[in-house]
Amino acid sequence: MRMDENAQAQTLACGRAVARDFLRSAAFLLLACVGFGLLVALYYTPLAPRMNALGLRLYLLRPLHTGAALGWIYFAGMAMAHRWLFEHMAAGQAPTLLRQVAFRARVQRWLWLGSALVAAVAYASGHTTGREYLEYPPWLALPILAGWLLFALNFAQVTRFRLGELPVHAWMWGTSAVLFVIAFVEAHVWLLDWLLARPVRDLAIQWKAMGSLVGSFNLLVYGSVAWLGTRLCGDDRYARSPTAYALFLIGILNSFTNYGHHTYHLPQGETMKWVSFAVSMSEIVIFAKVAWDCTGLGRRWATRGRYPLVVALLVATTTWTCLQLALALLISIPPLNVYVHGTLAIVAHSMGTLIGIDTMAMLAVGLWLTHELSGENQAASARGLVAVVALNVGLLILWCSLLWVGLGAGIRMTSTGVLPWIGAYPGWLGSMLLAAGALIAAGIASLAWPMLRRRRDSP
Ligand code: HEM
């Protein structure tokens, strides 16, 4: 049944409201992440003993920081995916679906928000499993998983699994849900006693699952940016082109197999290592595409139209993607990997990717969702551009400092066989992290602020 105009407008308005709710939670988590990041950075200064005395332990602040970072990406990705689902629904489905889909989206958001709150309370009261990225009480995996299943149900019902008709961004969001569910279950296998008795197998499964989980949220981000791109240029031909699907397939292959570049040091079969290495290197194709895109950044900026801030953030995303892919490709080569494994260079790689690519892209998505109907306000855009510059300068300082110290430590580690203890880092590192952190925090706070407000956008 086709919708009449009223029902269509109602569906679109409902989609915008659902997206706004997810986005508000996302922006809140991003600000929390930055706040905890600044506290974590204090551990690299002489204030570390005082932090311990105050009960602000690194092993509790770290999961608060990283958990909020991941939550920000998941919530923001869900905002855009739901915005599209409702638009797809408005394009020609029975209005009866509207209530069910909106209800499930709301339950999903509350399940996730409740889980985030319980996890934060657990950390604040000193409880952690000690398992990196899965530090929360293990039973919280159930509501998190239930939230994903609700999204998967919404996706299946709205698209009716007519996969051949779906653009690449819908494929990315759908695949993200499947990948998350599989990898998340796999990541919790560590709770079984038989695995704890096999540390090498445990490490391999942990990296494999975490690699796929990162793949799943990358797909949420790529899907969101791909749809944003089609909306900004008003043409969705690229989203249905062979190039788009080919790049998507390379990404999927990597999500499942390239984890091996994290476990080169484990006594595993050589075949797996070679497969991982070969697949990791296939990302050269993506690198070439992104490097080519970088040559058109001037033209991209010239098309900014009503959304200068959104386009500035997308230009920054492309530049950082190029830098990060170059670094990722280099450190996936085994003899070079030896020098960075377990050092701050890896923090540069992971935090650089999360801020430079994922956060930059999702800020663009969030600002588009916020100003979709009215376009950006000129004065606010001018202020926003200063914030984008501050964020990027801060990130560059953070990235270079972590890489420099990490590489130095890696070289020393390979010659002495000892990994430096946290206190053995150069004295300037803490101040540099705090200065970079202050710039990042100022930039992010200014950009995320409009997403937190309840004001409604009007055409
Ligand atoms: C004020 C800005 C920030 C500062 C000062 C900061 C600081 C830090 C520091 C010092 C670490 C290393 C912790 C350790 O000793 O293990 C870290 C890790 C991390 N940060 Fe941030 N951070 C900031 C913003 C962000 C943002 C915006 C994100 C993502 C949205 C993020 C994501 C991460 C992740 C994922 C890690 C773990 C990296 C790894 O283990 O490889 N950070 N952060």
Image (tube, helix red, strand yellow):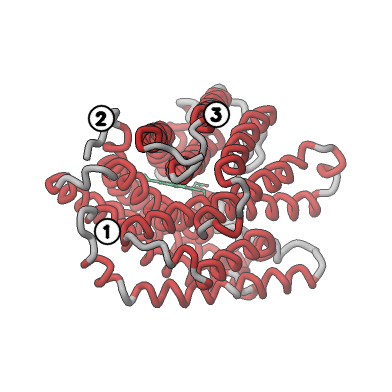
Mark 2 is on which residue type?
Arg
Residue carrying label 1: 312
Of residues 161 and 287, the one nearer the viewer is 161
Above or below, 220 against 415 in this view is above
Q: Give the structural element (helix, strand or loop) at label 2.
A: loop
Residue 104 sits in which quadrant?
A: top right
Q: Give the structural element (helix, strand or loop) at label 3.
A: helix
The disc label shown at residue 100, or none: 3
Residue 399 sits in which quadrant?
A: bottom left
Instruction: Point out residue 165 in the picture as x, y percentages from the top left corner.
Output: 55, 57
Residue at 15% across, 51% down? 382
Q: Give the structural element (helix, strand or loop) at label 1.
A: helix
Residue carrying label 2: 455
Mark 1 is on which residue type?
Ala
Of residues 341 and 231, the one nearer the viewer is 231
**Mark-to-mark CA distance, 1 and 3:** 37 Å
Give whichever of discs 2 and 3 has the lower sequence position.
Answer: 3
Of residues 398 and 19, the one nearer the viewer is 19
**Which one is in front in this view, the residue at disc 2 or the one at disc 3?**
3
The C terminus lies in which quarter of the figure? top left
Instruction: Point out residue 310 in the picture as x, y percentages from the top left corner.
Output: 29, 53
Residue at 46% across, 63% down? 239
**Mark-to-mark CA distance, 2 and 3:** 26 Å
The disc label shown at residue 243, or none: none
Give whichever of discs 1 and 3 has the lower sequence position.
Answer: 3
User: In the image, is 429 to the left or to the right of 149?
Assistant: left
Categorize mark 2 by other alpha carbons within 10 Å: few (<14), some (14-19), many (20+).
few
The CB of the residue at mark 1 lies under 8 Å from ligand 1: no
